[in-house]
Image (cartoon, helix red, strand yellow):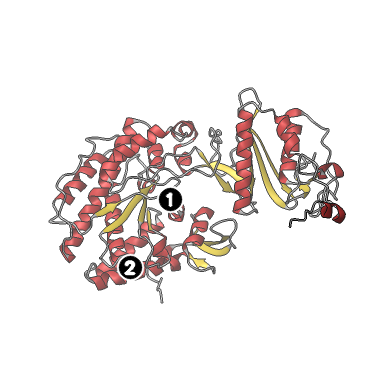
Amino acid sequence: MTTLAGTLWDQVGLWRVRAAPDPDATPRPIALPVSWDEQAAEALAALAPGSGPVVFPKLAEGWISRLALRGRELGLLADAAAQDGFAHALRALLLSRRGAPGVAIWRAEARGASRFVLNLPAFLEADGGFDTARYAAAVALAVRALDIWTGAKAPRLCVGYADLAGMLASLGLRYGSAEARAVGAAVAALTRGAAEAESGRLADILGAKEPLALFAPAPPGATVVPGLAEAARAALEAAAGSLGLRHQALVALAAPDCVEALLGAETGGLAPAPGATRLALDQHGWVAEVPSRAALRIGRAQAEALLAPVPDADWIAMAQAAAPFLHLPPPMPVAEAAPARAAPPLPERAATQPLRPSGSVWRVSVGGHKVVLRTAEDQQGRLSEVTIALTKESAAYRSLMDAMLQAVSIGLASGVKLDSFIEAYAYTRFGPAGTVEGDPAIRRATSVLDWAFRRLALDYLGRRDLADPSEEDCAPDATGHAAEQLPLLPMDLPETPTPRARRRQLKLVG
């Protein structure tokens, strides 16, 4: 049985919340550290096997104790003291949200791909520096943990890092700047040097499998982060002093998943930040726009400039700077679920207040289903973008709604009149439908789109000629008025011939 007494877990206060890995799954009770948010709870719900309650210390200690015991059996941890020290280091790394293994290790999936992720912003220091010593130690710990997990047999491991964009913004660097690329290259070089040095130490224990590659690109000569370039150079030199390596490849970045969410990393690998805000559920279950963690660290004055979306060319330049130190090319950034738009201004006071884009926000329920309608306006105050967020519907339903509203936004930007969309979507019929709560001017709607576009007609066109439908029209089995039941084909159907007429069409052939 996993023992928690006498470990770092004794000092961890927990709070309980119900969370699910996605809106379509059944929520499960999650107990996690009090300083962690609901996003971490959702990540734990995805990481934990099964569907029952999850207690974070017990879940984490499960794989930590297995790795420590297996490391002792393989001879990679020399004695009981080394075993305890290894387990303690993993607990400390996880509790500080500096690093965590991939899904396969959490779920004990022997055939799953193994990886270890380090959260770069978690290694930032209060004075604006980067804790290179602890980062290099974390990289070495990750290499050893993955080697133990694979039975010391895998020629390739996957140690990566996340949220370079958040780290750069916290350092006051614009993602597309030369200074930022130098930092990105130095971080990649430090990661490779520390990983290969640990591979060399493992080779001293179990024997080398790969000759040392004497050629390596030189890291940047200097960066704006004190000591980073020097630490990267020292790590590569330490690796060069090994007699051989245990692995063919060690450093690789991967697309983010629930592990990055558990650590609080907002981007994966080298990906740029999508903006100064992110979408989250507030305490009432509504979708709200809140400042990103990087925005909270740097404050309002710099957030909008340093965290604004960047062109693809900036990401390509960053990838080219880091690629010489990676064993695999970095993946393309994952598209964000939130619609692309300029980031709204941050609040003067801190953080927990939802941000409002330029335009309006309506929060209502239609037939008992929560709906959030957001609009954006151009400089002349004209409607330029429409988005709808739903919190209870299926993923397929939400995806279709997002695609439809994106088409509407593209149409508005291309000069299509709002009246055209209102005529097309007002009084459309599909569930959810029924009573509208939260909108004093619209009491009933035949669909979410019906309410949304009649609300837009009121706000942007001043139209008051779109009356509420009746209760019968909002019923699930409503068929609509006679005018709404016209034939779907643009031509009359052919008449069905009588039996006598069919017989006249027959010909005797003999």
**x and y percentages locating residue 208 in the rendered image:** 16, 61
**x and y percentages locating residue 299 in the rendered image:** 47, 36
Q: Nearer the viewer, residue 88 or 313?
A: 313
> Image check: 135 left or right of 371?
left
Residue 89 visible, this orientation: yes
Q: Residue furthest top?
A: 380
Amino acid residing under circle 2: Leu
Badge 2: how crowded within 10 Å, few (<14), some, or many (20+)?
A: many
Residue under pointer 1: 256
Among numbered discs 1 and 2, the one appearing first in the sequence: 2
Q: Nearer the viewer, residue 381 or 447?
A: 447
The answer for how far apart the CA atoms under marks 1 and 2 are is: 23 Å
**Quadrant in the picture for residue 403:** top right
Q: Is residue 54 above or below residue 510?
A: below
Q: Nearer the viewer, residue 411 or 241?
A: 411
The image quadrant where one finds the C terminus is bottom right
The image quadrant where one finds the N terminus is bottom left
**x and y percentages locating residue 191 in the rendered image:** 28, 48
**x and y percentages locating residue 480 in the rendered image:** 83, 47
* Secondary-structure class at tag 1: loop
Marking on residue 498: none
Which one is closest to the eye, mark 1 or mark 2?
1
> Image check: 397 left or right of 74?
right
Q: Nearer the viewer, residue 411 or 471?
A: 411
Residue under pointer 2: 67
Q: Residue furthest bottom?
A: 1
> Image check: 391 left or right of 507?
left
